[in-house]
């Protein structure tokens, strides 16, 4: 059964199609919040390390590790924001294409793949940051 463009049924169908990207967008926002919190903690530790060089018990290796972790978290934040932007763009394109009556299946599919790829890359960087942090804690 075909749905007439511009009808309430058509709008309902489009809303159904953007549910997954909308949930993805919410998850990405929560993930970015976690990443930013960890990043702020690391920046605080790096500042403390730079201020109290004489009284700090670990050496330059610890500072290098903290900086590496900060870089991984920064890249994870950027990638996550890119993932969220792709998901938001996907939602906008879906509604716009529906209003105009243009087929958008392939474009939306590609945007969803891009969004998921960026999120996966961000998660992998986050996992690397956690691993480095855990390794450093075991060395102390």
Image (tube, rainbow, N blue to C red):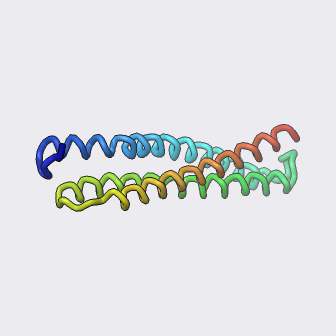
Viewer-proximal residue among 74 and 3 = 3
Quadrant position of the N terminus in the picture: top left
Q: Quadrant of residue 134?
A: top right
Quadrant position of the C terminus in the picture: top right
Viewer-proximal residue among 75 and 21 = 21
Work out which residue is located at the far front of the displayed protein and give it.
Answer: 1
Q: Is residue 51 left or right of residue 114?
A: right
Query: For the point 75% across and 55% down, which residue is it?
Result: 50
Query: For the point 66% across and 58% down, which residue is it?
Result: 71
Q: Position of residue 22 (x, y in %)?
A: 37, 43
Q: Position of residue 81 (x, y in %)?
A: 48, 54
Q: Is residue 133 left or right of residue 28?
A: right
Q: Position of residue 105 (x, y in %)?
A: 33, 56
Viewer-proximal residue among 84 and 109 = 109
Query: Number of numbered discs present?
Result: 0
Q: Position of residue 114 (x, y in %)?
A: 48, 58
Q: In the figure, 132 relative to 138: above or below? A: below
Q: Quadrant of residue 75?
A: bottom right
Query: For the point 60% across and 54% down, which residue is it?
Result: 121
Query: For the point 29% across and 58% down, which residue is it?
Result: 93
């Amino acid at each position: 059964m075909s749905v007439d463009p511009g009808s309430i049924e058509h709008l309902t169908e489009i809303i159904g199609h953007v549910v997954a990207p909308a949930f993805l967008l919410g998850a990405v926002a929560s993930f970015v919040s976690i990443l930013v919190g960890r990043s702020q903690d690391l920046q605080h530790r790096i500042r403390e390390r730079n201020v109290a060089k004489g009284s700090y018990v670990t050496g330059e290796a610890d500072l290098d590790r903290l900086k590496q972790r900060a870089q991984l978290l920064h890249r994870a934040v950027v990638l996550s924001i890119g993932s969220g932007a792709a998901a938001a763009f996907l939602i906008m394109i879906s509604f716009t294409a529906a209003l105009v009556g243009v087929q958008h299946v392939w474009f939306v599919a590609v945007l969803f793949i891009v969004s998921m790829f960026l999120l996966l890359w961000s998660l992998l960087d986050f996992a690397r940051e956690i691993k480095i942090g855990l390794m450093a804690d075991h060395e102390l």
